[in-house]
Amino acid sequence: MFIDLARIRVKGGAGGAGAVAFRREKGVPRGGPAGGNGGRGGNVILVADPQLDTLLDYSYRENYAAGRAGHGEGKNRTGADGDDLILPVPPGTIVRDADSGERLGELLAAGDRLVVAKGGRGGRGNASYATPTHQAPREWEPGEWGEERRIEFELKLIAEVGLVGEPNAGKSTFLAAVSAARPKVADYPFTTLAPNLGVVPLSDGRTVVIADIPGIIEGAAEGKGLGTQFLRHIERTRTLALMVPADSPEPQLAYDRLREELRAHDPLLATFPFCVILTKSDLVPPDERGNLASRVHAPEAWATFAISSVTREGLTELCEALWARVEEAKQDEPTAEDKFPELEDWRP
């Protein structure tokens, strides 16, 4: 099951209390204070795990707590630190404080880590209070409680190309034809109930990652059909691909509906670069295939393609064009120096 939203409660481990103790050794009269400090409580840490692609595990359980620390002991022994709690999440997960809405961070690359609840500090034992004028202290500190908060996960799949189209537009069939992904393909609406990712291999070891988004119908922005709940997964893409069946009775109307639903969901999506893909060209009579691109007037698109996932007509050219467009977008992205010019001063 694909889950892309989840809320949990996390709690850092409590710190250990400091100890009150005095040395009692043969031959060492008045040995002095020897109470050790308490240990540090464990942190709750999120780690991006590339083996995960859903937040399903966090829909079964709500409370997560790191280990509490050990108390200080005599002979100046510090208590053991609490065990950190590691929670794996899929790359592309955004983390927010569920109560305040504050964005705590996001985990994009495999191995990215984010501390969401710090463990409490350990308390001081009486040995820490000793001074030349206060040589037998009995003061000690309790350990601090760990941080506790409710956090919200929002998963946005990391893909370079997002496929957008109405139900049965051929998105899943295309993804299955060009990648190893095996989305469900059938001749009825809403076959795809959750986004699918596919890695398309090209020559020379090149790849392009494509996301298949469940079909969008007219009125999706108002919640009809599956709504636009999954459109968050194309917000990270570098280009969109609007898929329109070439055998549609009104392909221009289908294209206009897609553009309008994108705009209604988020005006920013309407500004994304996109191409138009006329699918199912094999269902068009042979004498009408020569001018398929003219069936849709899309002056804002960077290109229009006609393909058939069944006969594989036009697939190679399309995938090469998508890869080239993605690489071009990568070149146009600002570098760290562009975003933060002050970093230039820190270069050795």
Image: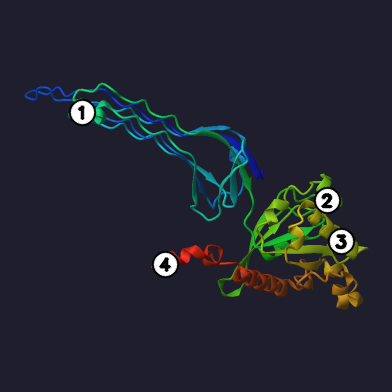
SS category of the residue bearing label 3: helix
Mark 1: which secondary structure?
loop
- Earlier residue among tags 3 and 1: 1
- Check disc 1 and report the residue beneath it: 75
Looking at the image, do the residues carrying marks 3 and 4 touch, with CB atoms under 8 Å apart? no
Which residue is located at x 77 percent, y 73 percent? 303
Residue 22, position as x, y percentages in the image: 19, 23
**Quadrant of the frame with the N terminus:** top right
Q: Quadrant of residue 141?
A: top left
Q: Identify the image quadrant of residue 154.
A: top right
Mark 3 or 4: in front is: 4
Mark 1 is on which residue type? Lys
Of the two numbered discs 3 and 1 in the rendering, the one whose residue sits closer to the viewer: 1
The disc at residue 24 is none
Residue type marked 4? Arg
In three-dimensional space, the C-alpha distance between marks 4 and 1, rounded to whole angstroms, equals 47 Å
What amino acid type is highlighted by mark number 3?
A: Asp
Q: CA distance from mark 2 to mark 1?
A: 72 Å
Residue to which mark 3 is pinned: 256
Q: Which residue is mark 4?
A: 347
Which of these two is toward me, 206 or 111? 111
Q: Name the residue that disc number 2 marks.
A: 189
Q: Earlier in the sequence, mark 4 or mark 2?
A: 2
First in residue order: circle 2 vs circle 1: 1
As drawn, is 11 to the left or to the right of 98? Answer: left
Residue 337: give x, y in percent of width and height.
Answer: 52, 66
